[in-house]
Amino acid sequence: MRLTKIFLTVAAAVATASPAFADNMQGITDKTIKIGNMGPFSGEAAVFNPLNYGPEAYLRYINAQGGVHGRKFETVFADDACNEAKGIAAARKLIYEDKVFMLMGVPCSGVAMAIKPMLEKEGIPWVGPAANPKLTRPTVPAMFHVTYTGIESGQAMAGFAMSNPALKKIAIVEHSNDWAHGYCNPASEYIKSHGGEVLERIAMERGSTDGTTQALKIKSIGAQAVMGCLYQQELIILLRDMQKFGVTAPVIGALGADFDQTVQQVNNPAAVRDKFFQPYQFKAKIGTPALKEFEDMFTKYLTKDELPKAGPPTNFYYFGIPVAIVTVEAFKRAGASPSREKWIAAMESIKDFDTGVLADKINLSKDNHVGVQRMFAVGLDKDGKQTIYSSWGKAQN
Amino acid sequence: MLAVLPQLVVSGIATGMLYALIALSLTVGYRATTVVNFGHGEMVMAGAYALFVFAGFGLSFAPALILALGLLFLWGALTQRVFMRPIISGPHLSLAMMALAIGYAMRGGARLRWGSEVVTLTRPYSQDVFMLGPMVVTMDDLAISGFVLVLMGSLSILFYLTPVGRLVQAVFQSQRGAALVGLNVHAFHAMMWGVGAALGAAGGALLGLFLPLSPDMGVWTLVRGFAAMTLGGFGSFHGAVIGGLLLGVMEKLLGFYINTVFIDITAYLITILVLLIRPAGLFGRQTVVRI
Amino acid sequence: MAQPIVTPGPTSPTPRAPRLPRWLFWLIPLALLPLPLYLDQYRQYVVNLILVYVPVAIGFNVVIGNLGLLAFCNVAFFGIGAYTSGVLALKLGLPWWVTILPAGLMGALAGAAASVPALRGVRLFYLAIMTLAFGELLRWVYIRWVPVTGGSFGMSVPPPNVFGWVLDNEGHKYYAFLALAVITVVLTDRLLRSRFGRAFMAIKDNEQAAAAMGIPTDRYILLAFAWSGFVVGIGGSMYAALIGHITPIAFDLTELILQFAVVMVGGLGSLTGSVLGAALITTAPEFFRPFPGFLELLFGVLIVLVILFLPRGLASLLARLHPLFVDRYYRD
């Protein structure tokens, strides 16, 4: 009975509120800002859910500091299972039932692309780590990238290799999925337009247990460097098998693998030292004092289930957190009574903003919703010391 | 280009050994019960995780492996007894779906516990590389091949030199007949289903030696295992082994000499071609019903 | 498995019910007509998704339930339908309603192709594996045929258009989908009640006997596959219209297990069951939302329980309620 009453009151309130007003301020009360946090919490892609927990840690940290303009963030999680049909359902639930102010997260590009028309139509803001550049190019009013898309990362992969003038003939090893092509297509274009040559695009599928064919192919076509758009398991196999067959070409991996874990699991220094690199989106090494603040944030504000079962938070947590940092910054700038319009204007006003995590500063404007460009590279030097490079052989700072 | 041929063949055999083991484990269950376990991939996965758990108790490799295989034997027998037997005379579809659903649930369970962390096993040997003439062979290759050969050897002894083999043959040919002469067909089914699960688990354990574990690590097994079985002839033990080895080699050759995009579909192509052209495979008996 | 020889029983296994007229079934879609007035855009979407799975499930059921063959390639028909609709809309600029029939026909073509192994006598698990391989090969084609399918990124399909009217609201899509779902259900019902349906049942019961009695089993098998492909292809076209973004990953083995679950939980060989299964399995994840990690585990357990304790699915529960719901084209 009481439930019915509440329902009727709410329904009456919704019915009487003027639509424009309700839209602009949806999800905002005097005390709270409701945010939808969507990602793969089930299914094969669940390994990527640290990308959702990273920003959540930051929001809890901000709440602990008293929130923004007296409002605290309230997160509604929704599982998209990295599947379009389920993702649309999840997004619709967040928007029409939970009535969130905005969506955060959505690491799976396919899901992000599937919900994009709806977000555009409803004017729901989105900030997230999905790497498909088409989400924000051409610019749509309410969608922002404050982390690197496939274009920046792919160009960084190729650019790092080609900053060594000896590396011109390059092979690409990739999964046959949108994630891998999202990195390796821009990398391939960059190589071709900068005087290099893409010798061959070699497929290596998810779930591969062996990389002999790929390693021998790289050897036989005489590749001087390899772009490895592979998830962690397959990247490990490729590095190991290249070492096994004495293929010395350096490998530049994409952002689907954790650098430290990859090195550790290849379990053979010769296969990775001065040989395996990845684009690096952070300003300093994870675990160093420069990023300590964030590590503490993760361990303090995330529950045991949200943290890795063993070991410190992995790079995916750091990868996710800028999404929340920039979102919160825009709420700070949007003033005491934020609306979607004000928040978007505030996002677009962000210039030279240092997140404290990312290698580049955030620059957004009305026509540009891709916040970051410049990346570093990470690798092990000849002595096995992890180094952040600004270009080939040149350590950062 | 031909210079790498021997290497491709050797590496193909090493990969094929795993396929052979999977195909063999599927065949054991199939021969005994005439039902294919569509959830077999998860037995493989569970084998690797079981080994990880037992190794986590501080056991060394061999006892942990034995315990893991024992556990999967029990689990395999249990699934047959509890979930398959009540519906064994129902439609084949229910049997297939039941096995699939059990596997799906197991995968979900594994993901709940280990989905967000990377789990690895430690090799009980050093990670060496040998030169065999111009060919490179790793300790992993040798360990896997050796282990699979030992398993196959013991299975051959079991099936060809002991009465168990004749039991299998009897049940495979006529379950009613076997029951009439006093065989406990049900218990036999459960036992052989368990043996199949344990063999699959051994495959998972071997895989875990050189790959990080994941709840989805067994997904490939069904298709690769089937392709190997089909190629060798459904239900034939030595056919499964030879089919597995051939599949391993073919994947390498097709991938290297034609295009790497074919590696992933070699198994599908083989399955379709063999069943259309020579359904009996290399060593099997006629498998189709002509109407 | 050694199949016990089945003696075909009398053709009407259930006692004649005090006959309720079959037109009563028409009340169901009629009663559903005002639904969009009560549902928000989220709930309406879930309902639309159910309607997509109605043709998918009844098409699948024709082959695995009524015909009794282990064909695991339903996802292939589904994908073909979705891609046909998407490619025609995107590359040729055709409105969605024009693409529905071609999507169904392409599905039927795929169905005919998938029936080849069955016609060559491949049965049981061999057929299961072969058709599975067929579906996975098609998925490989979606990934590789980039100029047409958009490759792994997939393709974004424009909002569906019916007679020049753009359905950009879930409520609008609902009516189009409801109409298609009703049409596919009614046509399949007609098919199953005709001599074709009886022939399917004869083949399922005992193929040799059916052939010996002069039933041209090959022709009926081909027909069942083609019809299944046709109906599921239409479902695929609805999927493209609903989701608006088609990627190869949507047609993988996980999707196959889902479609299987719809049929098994609903009831093998039952039209009513297919509809119930579609409703239950599509909405289940929405109820499990608070516990996403448990979804796979619960889903697996649910199917196991249904097979063990309700082997004829939810449809058998309904049949217990009233003989009107008893399926007359299916027997164990």
Image: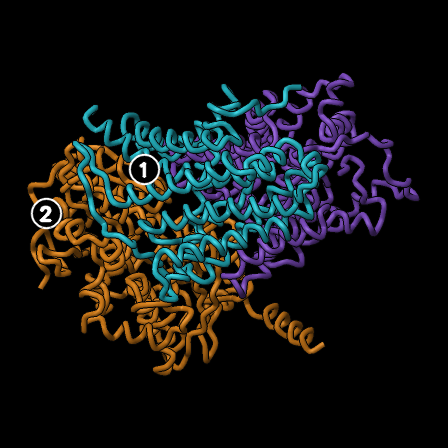
Q: Position of residue C274 (x, y in %)?
A: 68, 43
Left or right: C130, with B140 as reference point = right
- Please give the name of the residue rendered at 26% of the width and 52% of the height, measured from the top-left corner: B125
Above or below, A9 against A275 in this view is below
Q: Colour of chain A?
A: orange
Give the farthest residue toward the right. Answer: C18
Q: Position of residue A252 (x, y in %)?
A: 20, 48
Left or right: A257, with B221 as reference point = left
Along the viewing direction, whichever of B227 and C224 lies nearer the viewer:
B227
Q: How many marks?
A: 2
Q: Position of residue A329 (x, y in %)?
A: 31, 71
Q: Is residue C74 visible?
A: no
Name the residue that disc number 1 marks. B14
Q: Quadrant of the N terminus of chain B?
A: top left
- Please give the name of the residue rendered at 61% of the width and 44% of the height, measured from the top-left corner: B189
Disc 2, disc 1: CB below 8 Å? no
Name the residue that disc number 2 marks. A163
Q: SS at mark 2? A: loop
Mark pair 2, 1: CA separation: 39 Å
Which class describes the residues within 10 Å of circle 2: few (<14), some (14-19), or many (20+)? some
Left or right: B115, with B160 as reference point = left
Along the viewing direction, whichever of C266 and B48 lies nearer the viewer:
B48
Q: Colour of chain B?
A: cyan
Above or below, B116 against A8 in this view is above
Q: Position of residue A206 (x, y in %)?
A: 36, 44
- Please give the name of the residue rendered at 24% of the width and 42% of the height, measured from the top-left corner: B138
Amino acid tagged 1: Ala
Which chain does tag 1 point to?
B
Amino acid tagged 2: Ser
